[in-house]
């Protein structure tokens, strides 16, 4: 008889965004017409860059003509897009081959699918608080999860110790939700650890474009030794506003080998079996992101979000609230004042000043007592929310 994948029973219901929406709706129903300042949003609010839009239009036109029409695309991605990504890495001093780049429909897809490469008996180390997909995708695959709690005592950037285990190691830097970023030396410790025990790091670089400090690595492959222990998963969602357009890329070095098996070859085999690639039109749009014009335009959008982050951080500084992130990331992670719990603080902000953020406990138990603010909102709302928070927090 057919048996369902019983691992799904182990999944906790994800109440986070459902509960946020429900509580907000209850409040607006009771206060019709009231404006809510949405600072919890993890989606971008600015439209695509005009160079991307132009490239998408040209892609559509290509599909209308016999000579330029494209049918199935290469499963692992078009060379014209891989070339631009290779150039992007090259500008950071990282040399990768076209064959080491895999074009995807986004980081979420890859974070789940890539687990096909590893035996089910291999454990997954998740640094928490964490992007919920790491835990959920690992549970679905029936993996043992090792939770490594992070806290303000280590700036939410834990390092491996002699007791650390984990065959797969999830590292997200800049981090969602904490906004914390690993330095070069810290990442080197994780790379040495992974190489010493044969682990593989799944490096989530979804927010690399937000890094502004010169010495902070954008890619795990800026770290010596990473080519034998890491896979990097990237996305154009936050880099270039592709959350609804869907495009990402994954880098698997040819030298990542365990027990004689080359993970790059395995992923080629996987992709050529399980996908027929990403749409030609979308890949054309993606290739515009890393042109001179594209880089300039996406830089402007990121600047806008960063100014939002600065506005929020100034308010928290004035109110002497502890936080991390905001500088090299679009998220600000703050400690709820007066030992409040995450949901208690959520209710306070909603009911007193109509600001909605994300309770930290939604990212794992280590997030209790913390709260995430996002810089992806509109400037007007961000300014008003910051002002309201400053006044409220100072008065507590
Ligand atoms: N990884 C992290 C850390 C994220 O925060 C997100 C989206 O919010 C993703 C991956 C998923 O990105 P994508 O839109 O490319 O699926």
Image (tube, rainbow, N blue to C red):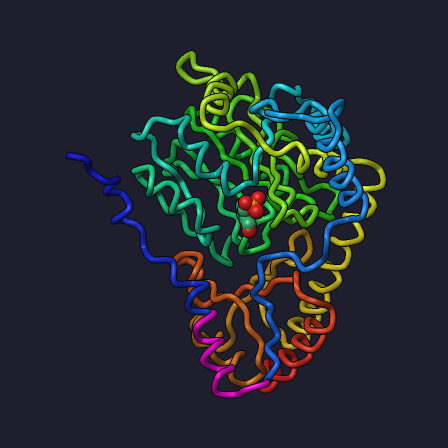
* Above or below for 156 versus 272: below
> Residue 395 falls in which quadrant of the image?
bottom right
Image-based side of 338 in relation to 217, left or right? left
> Residue 15 falls in which quadrant of the image?
bottom left
Residue positioned 68% across, 36% down in the render: 281
* Above or below for 266 versus 396: above
Which image quarter holds the C terminus? bottom right
Residue positioned 80% across, 48% down in the render: 50
* Above or below for 273 versus 359: above
Residue 266 location, x and y as percent? 46, 19
Residue 32 location, x and y as percent? 54, 87
How many numbered tags mark residues here?
0
Image-based side of 126 in relation to 189, left or right? left
Residue positioned 58% across, 27% down in the render: 102
Which image quarter holds the N terminus? top left
Magenta segment's dominant SS is helix
Image-based side of 384 in relation to 243, left or right? right
Residue positioned 42% across, 24% down in the render: 198
Residue 29 lies in the magenta stretch = yes
Q: Which residues are magenta?
A: 21-33
Residue 71 location, x and y as percent? 62, 25
Residue furthest to the top in view is 260
Residue 52 location, x and y as percent? 76, 43
Residue 112 vs residue 200, the one in the foreground = 112
Residue furthest to the left in view is 1
Residue 190 lies in the magenta stretch = no
């Amino acid at each position: 008889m057919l048996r369902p994948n019983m691992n799904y029973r182990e999944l906790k219901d994800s109440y986070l965004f459902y509960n946020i929406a429900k509580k907000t709706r209850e409040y607006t129903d009771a206060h019709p017409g009231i404006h809510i300042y949405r600072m919890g949003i993890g989606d971008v609010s600015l439209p695509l860059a005009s160079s991307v839009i132009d490239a998408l239009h040209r892609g559509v036109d290509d599909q209308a003509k016999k000579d330029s029409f494209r049918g199935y695309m290469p499963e692992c991605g078009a060379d014209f897009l891989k070339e631009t990504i290779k150039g992007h890495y090259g500008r950071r001093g990282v040399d990768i081959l076209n064959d080491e780049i895999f074009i995807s429909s986004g980081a979420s897809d890859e974070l789940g699918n890539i687990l096909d490469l590893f035996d089910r008996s291999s454990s997954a180390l998740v640094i928490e608080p964490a992007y919920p997909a790491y835990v959920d995708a690992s549970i679905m695959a029936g993996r043992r999860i090792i939770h490594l709690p992070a806290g303000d005592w280590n700036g939410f950037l834990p390092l491996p110790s002699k007791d650390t285990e984990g065959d797969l190691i999830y590292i997200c830097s800049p981090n969602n939700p904490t906004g914390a970023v690993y330095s070069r030396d810290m990442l080197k410790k994780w790379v040495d650890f992974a190489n010493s025990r044969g682990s593989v790091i799944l490096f989530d670089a979804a927010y690399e474009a937000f890094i502004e400090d010169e010495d902070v690595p954008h890619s795990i492959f800026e770290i010596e030794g990473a080519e034998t222990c890491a896979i990097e998963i990237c996305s154009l969602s936050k880099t270039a506003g592709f959350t609804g357009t869907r495009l990402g890329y994954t880098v698997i070095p040819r030298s990542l080998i365990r027990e004689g098996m080359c993970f790059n070859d395995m992923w080629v085999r996987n992709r050529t079996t399980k996908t027929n690639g990403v749409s030609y039109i979308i890949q054309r749009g993606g290739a515009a992101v890393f042109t001179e014009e594209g880089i300039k335009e996406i830089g402007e959008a990121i600047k806008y979000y960063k100014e939002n982050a600065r506005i929020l951080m100034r308010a928290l500084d004035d109110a002497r609230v502890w936080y991390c992130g905001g500088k090299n990331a679009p998220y600000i992670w703050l400690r709820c004042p007066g030992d409040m719990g995450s949901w208690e603080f959520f209710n306070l902000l909603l009911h007193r000043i109509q600001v909605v953020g994300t309770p930290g406990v939604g990212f794992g138990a280590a997030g209790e007592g913390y709260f995430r603010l996002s810089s992806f909102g509109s400037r007007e709302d961000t300014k008003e929310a910051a002002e309201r928070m400053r006044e409220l927090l100072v008065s507590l």
